[in-house]
């Protein structure tokens, strides 16, 4: 069983922001497989379904970004999901806008949502898919990540979220090594 998590903030006002790219990737994956993410448990919206003949939990923590790990660890522990099958999708300022980077493990960097995930899971040994949001060196970091997007930016970021959803499928289908070769 896989746990695929998209990081984001739950309120509608954050929907059109860079910080919600993880949620968007999960939504795209759910839409492709006609999955409805409507169940609520452990401070998360989730669904348990099948993707590529594998049982999968799609999860969008509803704790706000900086506490994402609190929801994730409850799902991971209850369903006894291995670290290698816990895939986290999130926005990253250090990746070019609309691009993605896949890593099998690593630290949280400056991303507060990932700091929470690493702290709660007590490991850095889980795959992650980073969606590039670029950065504006003149704007405050928090204002940038939760600022509203222009139509052009949204189109670029939607392409990144789509690539991330496809990369998650590739990991399930063929493993992280092949996914990294294909998407990095």
Image (cartoon, rainbow, N blue to C red):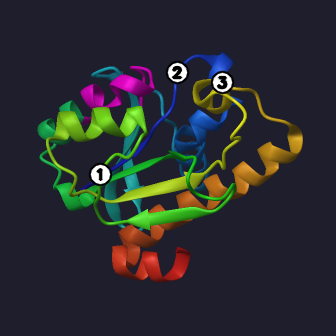
In this rendering, does residue 39 appear at all?
Answer: no
Residue 101 placement (x, y as % from top left):
50, 64
> Which residue is drawn at the image coordinates 43% and 39% (left, top)?
111
Image quadrant holding the N terminus, namely bottom left
- Residue 174 magenta-highlighted: no
In this rendering, does residue 51 appear at all?
Answer: yes
> Which residue is drawn at the image coordinates 87% and 40% (left, top)?
151
Residue 52 placement (x, y as % from top left):
42, 68
Q: Which mark is residue 107?
A: 1
Distance CA(mark 2)–CA(mark 1): 24 Å
Quadrant location of residue 63?
Answer: top left
Distance CA(mark 1)–CA(mark 3): 24 Å
Name above or below for residue 104 compared with residue 137: below
Residue 35 placement (x, y as % from top left):
51, 45
Q: Which mark is residue 10?
A: 2
Q: Is 113 positioned to the left or the right of 134 in the image?
A: left
Query: Could you say whether the residue bearing mark 1 is in a helix, strand or loop?
Result: loop
How many marks do you count on the picture?
A: 3
| Region in magenta | 61-72
The disc, 2 or 1, on the residue closer to the chain's N-terminal end is 2
Residue linked to disc 3: 143
């Amino acid at each position: 069983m896989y746990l695929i998590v998209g990081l984001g903030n739950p309120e509608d006002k954050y929907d059109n922001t860079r910080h919600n790219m993880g949620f968007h990737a999960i939504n795209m994956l759910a839409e492709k497989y006609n999955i409805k993410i409507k169940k609520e448990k452990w401070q998360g919206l989730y669904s348990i379904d099948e993707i590529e003949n594998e049982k999968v939990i799609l999860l969008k923590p509803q704790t706000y970004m900086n506490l994402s790990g609190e929801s994730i660890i409850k799902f991971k522990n209850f369903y006894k999901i291995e670290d290698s099958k816990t895939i986290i999708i999130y926005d990253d300022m250090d990746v070019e806008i609309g691009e993605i980077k896949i890593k099998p493990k690593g630290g949280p960097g400056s991303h507060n949502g990932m700091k929470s995930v690493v702290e709660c899971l007590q490991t850095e040994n889980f795959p992650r898919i980073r969606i590039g949001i670029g950065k504006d060196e003149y704007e405050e970091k928090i204002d940038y990540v939760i600022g509203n997007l222009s139509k052009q930016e949204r189109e670029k970021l939607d392409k990144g979220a789509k690539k991330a959803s496809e990369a998650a499928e590739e990991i399930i289908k063929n493993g992280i090594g092949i996914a990294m070769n294909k998407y990095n």
